[in-house]
Image (cartoon, rainbow, N blue to C red):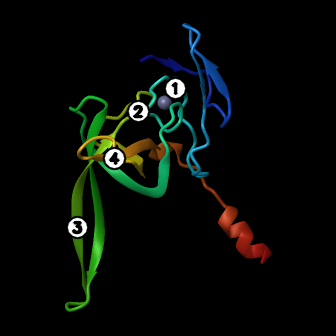
Amino acid sequence: MTTIKLPSRPHIGDVVTFPNGTRVRVANIGIPWIQPPSVACDDPECPWHGHLKIRPKTLEVVVESVRMHKAAVVIHEWVHYVPKYKRYERRRRKIHVRVPECIEVKPGDKVIIAETRPLAKTIAWVVIGKSEDVVNWTAKREVLTTA
Ligand SMILES: [Zn+2]
C-alpha cells in the first residue's frame, strides 16, 4: 500500500517500478478525455494501477466528506424538467465513492467518478480523476467533419 510521486504525468501503458520491486502498469481505462494521475499506487482496486474495471458512465461531482477509509461522500446535482409546470427543479443526491490511493481528495474538490462493480454495500462508484485532469477531446468533432 504505497504511492510514489512521478516527475511528470505518465502515458497510458507506462510501467512504474516501486522501490520494493513491485511493477504497475498505467491502464487504459477507456475514457480518452481524462489523463492518468501523476502519482502511482499499488492499490488493487484502482482503475489506473490495479485491476478494477469501470463502466462508461461518468459524473462530475463535488466532494462532501472524506472521513471514510479509502472512500468519500460526494454530491451530485442536476436539473430535472417538470412538464406540468414547464419549469426545472434542482435535484441532488449523495453518492458513496471509492477513492484510490493515487488520487487525493478534500471536501469541495470537483472530481470525475465512474460507475464500477459493487465494491461494498453502498459503494459502486470510483473516483477516476479531478476536474484538472480533463482534457479537450475532439475525436467526435473530427468524425462529424469528415463524414
Ligand atoms: Zn492508482
Residue 1 position within the rendered picture, expressed as x and y whole percent measured from the top left: 42, 18
Q: CA distance from mark 1 to mark 4?
A: 25 Å
Q: Which tag, 1 or 4, sits closer to the chain's start?
A: 1
| Residue appearing at x 47%, y 54% in the figure | 55
Q: Using the image, tell me which numbered label, if any, was put on residue 100.
A: 2
Which residue matches tag 4?
118
Q: Residues within 10 Å of mark 3 (few under 14, many from 20)?
A: few
The kind of residue tagged 3 is Arg
Sequence-first disc among 2 and 1: 1
Judge: label 2 CB < 8 Å from ligand 1. Answer: yes
Mark 3 near mark 1, Cβ–Cβ under 8 Å? no
Q: Quadrant of residue 19?
A: top right
Q: CA distance from mark 2 to mark 3?
A: 27 Å
Q: Contact (CB < 8 A) between labels 2 and 3?
A: no
Type of the residue with mark 1: Val
Which disc number belongs to residue 124? none
Q: Tell which residue pokes out farthest to the right in this image.
A: 146
Vertical position of residue 3 compared to residue 49: above or below: above
Q: Does label 3 or label 4 sit earlier along the sequence?
A: 3
**Within 10 Å of the Cα at label 4, are there few (<14), some (14-19), or many (20+) other Cα atoms?**
few
In the rendering, at what x and y percent does residue 100 appear?
A: 41, 32
Q: Residue at x 51, y 35 (%)?
A: 51
